[in-house]
Image: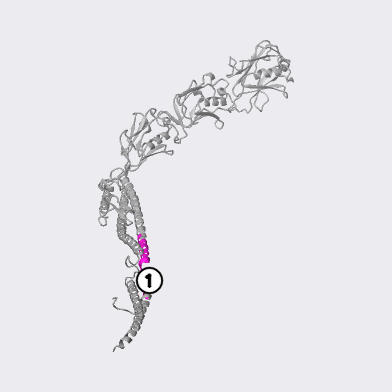
Amino acid sequence: MSEITLTSSIRSNLLSLQNASKLLDTTSERLSTGKKVNSALDNPSSFFTARGLTNRASDLTGRKDGLGQAISLLQATDKSISSITTLVDQAKATAQAADEASTAGITSLSTAAASFVGVGETGVASLSTEAIAATTTSSNLITINGSDGVVVNAASTLNQMAGTGVIDNSTIIFTVQVSEGQSDPIGAAGTSQINGASTMTQTVSALNGLTGITAAFNTATGSIDITGIGGINLGFGGNASFANGAGAGAGLNVVSTDGTATATTSLITGLLAGGSSAASGTQRFNTTGTSTDMAAQAFGLTDANAADFVFTIDGTATTAIVTDFLTIDALANSISATNANITAAFNSATNKIDITGNNGTIINLAGTAVGEYGITENGGSTALILSTDYAITDGSAPLISDLLTEIFDGALVNDTLTFGVTGGSSGTAFAVTASSTIEDLVAAINASDSSLTAAYNTTTGKVAITAADGTGVTLTSGGTTGLFAAAGFTSDGTTALVSGTAVTLGAKGTVAEVSALNNDFQSILENIDSLIKDASFKGINLLSGNNSSIVKFNSDGTSALTIDGLDIGITGNVNFNFTKDAAGYDFTSAGDIGQALSDTAAAVNQLRSIASTFGTDMGVIQAREDFTTELVNVLESGAGKLVNANLEEESANMLALQTRQALGIQALSISNQSNQSILSLFR
């Protein structure tokens, strides 16, 4: 209105009042809306930034509803799993009651007890000879001296030792004989020849050249002392002639000393007869009952050369020859040398030679005149039967490293034994060779199928095969006289297995024992199936039909969790650990009770695993729900900081503006009074 002219003061007051009114309107709007930015005109940057934050917070708030529903789904599923677990525990208890009531079934397959004593063999710990007898003497000394007590030294001759008896220079023969009076002298070089002119030293040297004796000149007694192996004979003779001495007993004496008496009867007759008649005689070295005695004499053999041992050890024949001058120790060593699996030794407590061997060694003893040794079983009175197999055993079970061919009678070599499992291995063949051991058999069974467990029991000597209840096992032999027949496979040690026929391991009961329990078990399983089908929330069942639920966490759905469902129904399922439908369990069938126990135990474990998986999902969702709530609060708070008004400040502004407006009106009124004064002049 340009036609109206306002004074400068009025215009100034009017403009001030208009500005105050405008500010008052803005402050009133802020107080009424609570926001300092109500439109893009107020502050475009803050307005649009706050709107973005608010929109995201709104989107996330919408996701929280989905998270809450997912948590409810998992809670419902968890309650269902708890109830199912309770029913499975009841089913397990029912199966345990049936197991306790059952009285039949097969728990294991096993061989017969392994033994080193086979068919037609006699088991012995040892074989022993008869005891050799000792004489009453404790010494074994033969002495050559002069009959009239002539004192001689090492350089003296036999003529000088004879004293008043005269020995010409004809040959004198010393012999060592196995049998007394033996016509053919034996020993080293057969004989040892001397004559009356031979000195003591020469005579001793000649005697020491013979096998089995030791001679020495005794300077104290002036005699020749001779010791020898117990049981042999010293022969003395020749064609020497002796002149009759001046006194009785003149000449040479060959006497024996037993440690208490000084001399016994002269053993060479005719020495005092004079003339040219030959004189001869023998003296036996007494047996002492020790291992140094001559074996032939100790055992009283009539023909030592024929008394040979023929040992057949584990099928290999070796001969131990008893030679004429073989001592008992040497004989034992000779027997031991026939085979590394046997040992012979003289037993000083029993005066017998004991023949022992490694567990499982088969000894067959023969030979000419072997019976003269009086061999018995186990050192007792039962005489050895020649040409009969004796199995050396200490009574303990064979070791796992022992050969199958030694402990199971039968044609084992090149045989095969096949182990098959119903629903598992179709059959793994174990080829038996001459070197196959019990350990090889055990390893072959264990390797044939993971459901089989074989072990060798060293107490019973049996190889036992065990498996989970309900497992069908088939053993098939490659031959009628092979390992299958030789090892005597049985079920529970009683019923012989049939080659190629499956047997099922596991307990079973009679109809009277387990029928009611079987019905209860089946009923519980059917109720478990029904409960699983009812475990749904808003049409989603995570326990039946492999349903799944996708839970989205962020506004655009790129962050999400898929809750995978399962199908654990008992009937026709593949995810629950029951191997049969409810109606398939029959406690009167071998293995079904054990299978029910195994299945229920596995089902409980599986339910715990499923609950744990769903629990993990619930934990994730709850964490995301808490995170989303916090994030929404942060977003809304951030948006508020951009657009929300400070009500305390705006209230103060409102009061100030109201005061300012009142003052403006008053000032304007004052300004108008001057104009009114002029107007009054026209009245």
Q: Where is residue 669 in the image (x, y as percent from the top left)?
A: 33, 83
Residue 375 relative to residue 50: left or right: right
Using the image as rendered, state which of residue 482 and residue 118 is in the foreground.
482
Name the element at disc 1.
loop
Indicate whether 602 appears above or below 110.
Answer: below
Residue 648 relative to residue 158: left or right: left
Whether the magenta-drawn stretch holds residue 544 is answered as no
Whether the magenta-drawn stretch holds residue 639 is answered as yes
Q: Is the magenta stretch mostly helix, strand or loop?
A: helix
Using the image as rendered, state which of residue 620 and residue 163 is in the foreground.
620
Indicate whether 609 appears above or below 118.
Answer: below
Q: Position of residue 148 (x, y in %)?
A: 72, 19
Q: Is residue 367 shown to the viewer in this render?
A: yes
Q: Quadrant of the C terminus?
A: bottom left
Using the image as rendered, state which of residue 641 and residue 247 is in the foreground.
641
Residue 225: image quadrant is top right
Residue 236 relative to residue 475: left or right: right
Q: Position of residue 121 (x, y in %)?
A: 42, 29
Q: Position of residue 555 (x, y in %)?
A: 32, 57
Indicate whether 516 appears above or below 187.
Answer: below
Q: Give the range drawn in magenta.
A: 628-651
Query: What residue does disc 1 label?
Result: 646
Query: Residue extending furthest top?
Result: 276
